[in-house]
Image (spheres, rainbow, N blue to C red):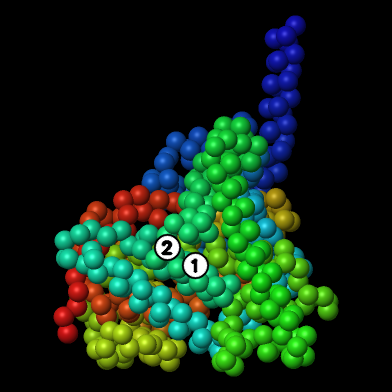
Amino acid sequence: MYLEIFAILLTTLFVWDYLRHRRHNRMYAAAGIRGPRSYPFVGTAPTLFKESPKTVFSLQSRLMAQYGKNVKMQMIGESGFTTADPKMIEAIMSSQQTIQKNNLYGLLVNWLGDGLLISKGKKWFRRRKIITPAFHFKILEDFVEVFDQQSAIMAQQLYDRADGKTVINMFPVACLCALDIITETAMGVKVNAQLQPQFPYVQSVTTASTMLAERFMNPLQRVDGIMKLLYPKLFAKLNDSVKTMHNFTDSVITERRDLLQKSIAENADANAALFNEVGQKRRMALLDVLLQSTIDGAPLSNEDIREEVDTFMFEGHDTTTSSIAFTCYLLARHPEVQARVFQEVCDVLGDDKSAPVNMQLLGELKYLECVIKESLRLYPSVPLIGRHITHDIVLDGKLIPAKSDVILFIYHAQRDPEYFSEPDKFLPERFSMERKGEIHPFAYTPFSAGPRNCIGQKFAMLEMKSTISKLIRHFELLPLGQEVELVMNVILRSSTGINCGLKPRVY
């Protein structure tokens, strides 16, 4: 009797699973989107999860070679496809109908709430409109001073290891510098991460970022209930880190709001809060913009503001860290490119290592910008982007069914030989003014594109140019240490570190 009941249940589950995916399978077949064998309940998961994060890049390359640039995938409870086709990426990124993020981004909700990265619909549109003024060039001009000061601290901290023989993993070095920059520009406070890496907020950001990266790759950690059951200590550690970050952010918001309201009460002028005790203009931060913003005449709550500040913290330090580290790695291994960057830096900034930079000078570092863009092509900080298709829609001439999850493989699209000659070579000249217009705009999308593009890309480029030019003024970068072994993650990383050596410059 029990065997009969079990057989009936099993048969029912098989039928349910078949019917659930039947429409998707038919529509993908009609669209010419194929993929690896799918099994009942688990879909194509066995094909994916037998690979380690280190080999996901090569797995995707093999699947594309077999099935094309659009590859059908079916996971537990999900149907969709991956794409590295710039034409399909253009159709998805350009449409207002395909801007919803997929459910993997739900892993970030505990930390970021429903901020700009995750939110959708009217809330996303309103928040985007509010935050855009924070990146006005006049505010960015003030931020450059922070970039310069913090990168100078980074350079000084590196001299102890700059003997031309010591291998330095640039990722943690750049991470602390980027964290100092983002806390000061987002919240208007100094945490001195480079000088005090044990500061609780700094440790919590590092812990949460690392653990979220692990959750992204480990299916057993993706559901809170399962993670809490199987990894109770890790789950508790993550929650403690998030609580520490939220408490710190809340305290900063409260203090800043009190200051603003006090100044308004005393001076009847909100702008007065942006001046310090001696009458000098206080540097604007993202937090100041949010505190003075309203929706339908009502100010944002502290929770609303925390969502956006935390989002800016998350998006603005690991991504920049990755690109700075990989650019240093490439410069160390291409001395001819490094020599040209150094010459440009000397020509534009002079030979005084301590001389401050400004926005105009950074704008004149044209070749360095080409170098950074080419580094982002080879090693995009965000190697993939997830979207959710909410209703049937035609994309690149293909009818895609509703409730489809799509993964855009930015990493593979940016190495497509159809769009980039010698795609695996480091050739900054691809981005020179003389070759402007040669690159398909959706074959190269390290900052995403379309309505959901990265709102802070100008900020990021200025920060990278400031930081890397500072390193180049102080040090010669040397090809020391292991080569990178890329790991698929929320942010592109290397399991072997992102290594180089340093030697003080002699002018």
Q: Residue 196: give its label.
A: 2
Image height check: is 95 above or below 349? above
Residue that numbered label 1 is attached to: 191
* Residue 138 in view, yes or no: yes
- Residue drawn 48% across the image and 59% down it: 199
Q: Is residue 473 above or below residue 69?
A: below
x, y percent for residue 315: 54, 65
Q: Quadrant of residue 394?
A: bottom right
Residue 43 x/y as whole percent: 58, 36
Q: Secondary structure at mark 1?
A: loop
Q: Secondary structure at mark 2?
A: loop
The quarter of the image holding the C terminus is bottom left
- Return the disc, 1 or 2, that comes first in the chain's sequence: 1
Residue count near mark 2 (Cα–Cα under 10 Å), binned few <14, some 14–19, many ≥20: few
Callouts 1 and 2 close, C-beta under 8 Å: yes
Tag 1: amino acid: Val
Q: Nearer the viewer, residue 51 or 35?
A: 51
Name the residue: 46% across, 83% down: 144
Residue 478 against residue 40 in the figure, above or below: below
Going by the image, does 228 lie left or right of 341? right
Q: In the rendered view, does 1 fall on the left or right side of 138?
A: right
Could you tell me which quadrant the N terminus lies in? top right
